[in-house]
Image (cartoon, helix red, strand yellow):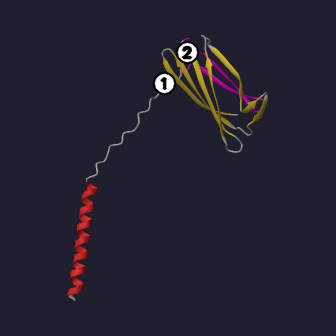
Amino acid sequence: MKKIIIPAGLFFLILIASILFLSRFKNNKQEVPVSPTPTRVLPTISDDIKVELTPQNNNRAVVLRVSGIPADVESIEYELTYLTGNNLPRGVLGKIILSGQKDVERNDIVLGTCSSGKCVYDSAVESIDLSLKFNAKSGVSVYWNTYKL
């Protein structure tokens, strides 16, 4: 019986010592505080600026009209995002350079791809998310809206 008790006792003694030893290292880990990345909130545009997005050619294209643009705005960046009938995400990016105009119209925005004069249009587009970034001498302001077609 002594032959079994001594090895069993040694086994449990080594097991307890190992647990205590490993738990000591586990508690020594220093947690690095995680701070969130600050997000810069941009101001929205003035209510004096009017934005229209009108479908054309059986929802194959859209016309973007912006009126009431302040004189210090130098450019407008636009991004249109939408889903096709096959639930594929698509988008259109562009930039309008201004020379003091108060009103601009972009009537060449195709919902699809064009190459060498031939276009393949995205089908069953039901809504478009439009975001505009107004770059002015006084700073940047933004506009965002969803348009149902």
Secondary structure type for disc 2: strand
Q: Position of residue 130 (x, y in %)?
A: 61, 30
Q: Residue at x 68, y 19 (%)?
A: 105
Q: Residue at label 1?
A: 43
Instruction: Determine crowd level at label 1: few under 14, some 14-19, many 20+ residues with C-alpha closer than 10 A.
Output: few
Was residue 80 drawn as part of the magenta stretch in this picture? no
Q: Position of residue 118 (x, y in %)?
A: 79, 30
Q: Residue at x 22, y 89 (%)?
A: 1
Q: Is residue 78 left or right of residue 111?
A: left
Image quadrant in which you'd find residue 69: top right
Q: Position of residue 22 (x, y in %)?
A: 27, 61
Q: Residue at label 2?
A: 73
Residues marked 2 and 1 touching at CB (< 8 Å): no
As drawn, the residue found furthest toward the bottom would be 1
User: What amino acid is found at the position of numbered circle 2 in the picture?
Assistant: Val
Instruction: Determine crowd level at label 2: few under 14, some 14-19, many 20+ residues with C-alpha closer than 10 A.
Output: many
Secondary structure type for disc 1: loop
Q: Where the C terminus falls, by quadrant? A: top right
Of labels 2 and 1, earlier in sequence is: 1
User: Comparing marks 2 and 1, which lies closer to the viewer?
Assistant: 2
Q: Residue at x 61, y 26 (%)?
A: 78
User: What amino acid is found at the position of numbered circle 1 in the picture?
Assistant: Pro
Q: Is residue 121 left or right of residue 9?
A: right
Q: Nearer the viewer, residue 47 or 106?
A: 106
Was residue 62 drawn as part of the magenta stretch in this picture? yes
Q: Is residue 108 left or right of residue 72?
A: right
In the displayed structure, 125 sits above or below 103; it is below
Give how far apart the Cα atoms at labels 2 and 1 are.
14 Å
Number of marks in the rendered image: 2
Q: Magenta part of the protein: which range?
A: 46-71
Image quadrant in which you'd find residue 121: top right
